[in-house]
Every structure is written in structure tokens, then in C-alpha cells.
Amino acid sequence: VNWQGRPSQPNSLQQVPITLTLKTGSTEANYLAKTTDASGSFTVSVGSLLTGTYSWRVKDPKFLANSGTLALAGVTTTNVEMGLMRAGDCNNDNVITVLDFNIMKLAFGKGIGEIAYDDRADFTGDQIVSVLDFNLQKRNFELGGAPPIHPN
């Protein structure tokens, strides 16, 4: 994945928590508590899943969800490009609205350790809620992420 507003890969600020859901028919696998590496990559074991086509969805609390499909063919490694993760979702509801803006407004100009600093509004990962974070949220205002995967 590529995290919007973060420095180009590889960079330690590309190391961001992510969740992954894989689903086909009634089979669903949820991978929680994963973190991307400095290149925006992460690895999960899918050895227990049958071969076939799966829907996938990835999400981080500050970013909108992405989704797509992938084919598991029983090979050791399957690489999947999961795209640009759009920043701005302070309240983790997968849509960027005035609720997210209000969190940003209260934390704006604050750095880690200061009263009113809220990490949910720091999309760049620099531990300061600045105009850079605001511009990311503004750019994506009123956008929503990929919805949860429903049964195929």
C-alpha cells in the first residue's frame, strides 16, 4: 500500500497499522494487528485458505478502506497492489465528514505532548497536527472508503 501524505517509500513513516479481510463465499479470514514495513508492504499467511478468487479489503483507522480481488493459486507468495490509502478519517467511520473536521479543528497546531493533541488527526506521522494534515483531509472531504465485504 501507499499511505497518502507520508514520505516516499522506503521510509519508517510508511510503517502503519493495517487490517486485512479476505472473503470468498462463506469463508472469511480477518488479519488484525498487521503493520506495513518501510516500503508499505505486509505479509499474511494464507496457507489455511483454499485456492480461488477472494475479495480483499484493507483499512487503517486514519485512512479510507480500499478493496479489490485476488486469486490464491496455492503458490508460496502472492503479491497484491492495494493502492493509495487516502488520509483524513479521524473517527474511523470510513467516510470523511464534518465529524473528522471537528477532531482536526480541536487538535490543529498541537504537537505530541501538548494538551489537545490528538493523534487521530496526524495523517503525516510527524506528531504535529499541521496544515499538511488539514490539506489531506480537505482534499478527501466527503469521500468514503470501500464498504465491508458482503458474501459472494
Image (tube, grey):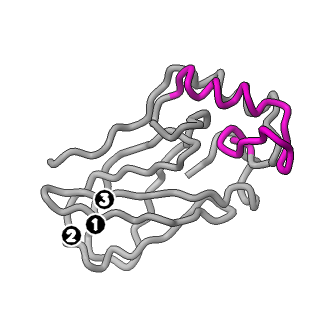
Residue indicated by mark 3? 22
- The percent coordinates of residue 127 (x first, y second) are 80, 48
User: Which picture quadrant has residue 23?
Assistant: bottom left
Residue 13 horizontal/vertical position (percent):
74, 55
What is the CA distance from the residue labelled 3 to the residue labelled 1? 11 Å
Pointer 1 residue = 72
Type of amino acid under label 2 = Thr
* Separation of residues labelled 2 and 3 (CA atoms): 12 Å
Q: Residue at x 39, y 67 (%)?
A: 78
The residue identified by callout 2 is 51
Q: Residues within 10 Å of mark 1 (few under 14, many from 20)?
A: some
Q: Quadrant of residue 135?
A: top right
| Mark 1 in CB contact with mark 2 (< 8 angstroms) | yes
Please report whichever mark, 3 or 1, sits nearer to the chain's N-terminal start: 3
Instruction: Provide the residue span drawn in magenta.
Output: 96-124
Q: Mark 1 to mark 2: distance in Å? A: 5 Å
Which callout, 3 or 1, points to the residue nearer the camera?
A: 3
Question: Is residue 103 on the magenta stretch?
Answer: yes
Q: Amino acid at mark 3?
A: Leu
For the point 48% across and 53% down, the residue is 81
| Residue at 52% across, 57% down | 18
Residue 138, above or below 147: above
- Position of residue 143 relative to residue 15, above or below, is above
